[in-house]
Amino acid sequence: MFDKSVYMNRRARLKERIKSGLILILGNGEAPANYTDNCFKFRQDSSFLYFFGISQPGFAGVMDAESGEEWIFGNDVDMDDIIWMGPQPSVRDMAAEVGVERTAPFAALADCLRKAVAAGRRVHFLPPYRFRNVQLIEDLLGIRHAMVKEYASLELVKAVVDLRSVKEACEIEEITKACNIGYEMHTTAMRHAKPGVKEQYVAGLLEGIAASYGSMISFPVILSQNGQTLHNHDHSQTLQVGRMMLTDAGAENNMNYCSDFTRTVPVGGKFDSRQKEVYNIVLACNNRAIEIARPGVTYQHVHLEVCKVLAQGLKDLGLMKGDVDAAVAAGAHALFMPHGLGHMMGLDVHDMEDLGQIYVGYDEETRPINQFGTSSLRMGRRLQEGFVVTDEPGCYFIPALIDQWRAEGLHREFLNYDRIDTYKDFGGIRLEDDILITAGGSRFLGDKRTPITVEEVEAIMAE
Ligand code: GLY
Ligand code: MN
């Protein structure tokens, strides 16, 4: 947990932004996996962690935007809990650690909110993403569960996004720790990418590394020699020479800050010449992003510049043709990169995605581009010092998509389909780093950059 002044300062800033009413921040409860007492690993809600810091199930925090009063609602353990779980700190002690003076049993939350509503006051809440909290809002505020998201407070969403987007120095320290765990996960994956090894074995090693640092993976591991499938959670294959293993994985550290890296390596340790050519294009894309990402530039612009590097590289290989700028403007490159360059990262791997991507990645000035590929860009708006974003270009050969585009005659002036067809067995490459926007530009996060050049990757795989 950070020093209580961190949480007090965040809440004070939030209350300054929300002019009236109560602010309700719900924590998460336990989530049963296959029966009530057998739960998934507990994960606290990120906004609750941000403002109230307590990583325990069954809590809610309330701030009065007018009087400034703050409460934590939660239940003290009883003897039965102590017998099964051991002694636990009291709610009052936990609240004191984050600078909150008032506490009450969870059941008192209903009364607190009812009084506010009866007095004609607004209760601001964030859009819940777990059904338990949707149901709780229905019970507490009488809003039908189907309507709960609609009644979430846009004013609160925007204020929380503004605060959480700019990372404090203490947060960068925690993200750096998560990145260092990611380094160990990815270098381990590289060392084990040998023919005959099952993907699930390597994926399991990565989960174990994250767990060995006390927390967990930041999202389900993507690891496959079929890297052309963007989010491939099927780890059932056995690695084969001639294929590349794409690993997209990150960790949460003990404070629930995340990392998210992707590396793509040749099974057996040596890139062939065709793999090397495409790999170096994707690497140039990744490096281009860090070169131009700086405060004042939109990430949409960075995305489009990176797409031009991809298109130029593929043109040099004879896969694309024509004017590169025109090809990217038309969206022809999206055959090879049908996703965005990156997303915000922090307490969530896709930071604040529960609050609505449109508010996290876009604003009145920068609007999403409604074109296949670029429409998947999660983060488009103008960068500010303190933003943490991922830089994850890729190049994929997706046979079904190639066939469909070819049949429809899409972007014939920019795509050399005969040559593209010869890459249908290639797979996909993605290279992802986590970057911090600094005053003068941007920098990689983590004490060391995970090996990324052809030489670095081959060297570590030869160990
Ligand atoms: N690294 C997985 C994702 O960003 O969706
Ligand atoms: Mn990512």
Image (spheres, grey):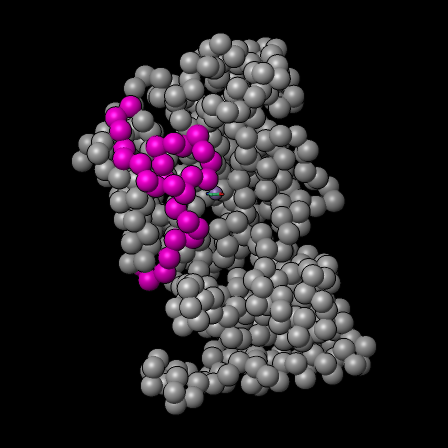
Farthest residue toward the left? 463
**Whether residue 178 is visible:** no
Query: The C terminus lies in which quarter of the figure?
Result: top left
Nearest the eye: 289 or 359: 359
| Rendered image quadrant of residue 321 | top right
Nearest the eye: 113 or 343: 113
Question: In the rendered image of this protein, does residue 54 appear above or below residue 254?
Answer: below
Q: How many marks?
A: 0
Nearest the eye: 9 or 60: 60
**Whether residue 43 is visible:** yes
Question: In the rendered image of this protein, does residue 46 appear above or below residue 95?
Answer: above
Farthest residue toward the bottom? 79
Q: Position of residue 460 (x, y in %)?
A: 24, 35
Q: Position of residue 136 (x, y in %)?
A: 62, 72
Residue 239 on the magenta segment? yes
Q: Majority secondary structure of the magenta segment?
A: loop
In the image, 315: left or right of 379? left
From which residue to which does the magenta span run?
Answer: 213-242
Q: Residue at x 58, y 16 (%)?
A: 407
Nearest the eye: 417 or 363: 417
Q: Position of residue 84 (x, y in %)?
A: 34, 82
Q: Residue at x 42, y 17 (%)?
A: 423
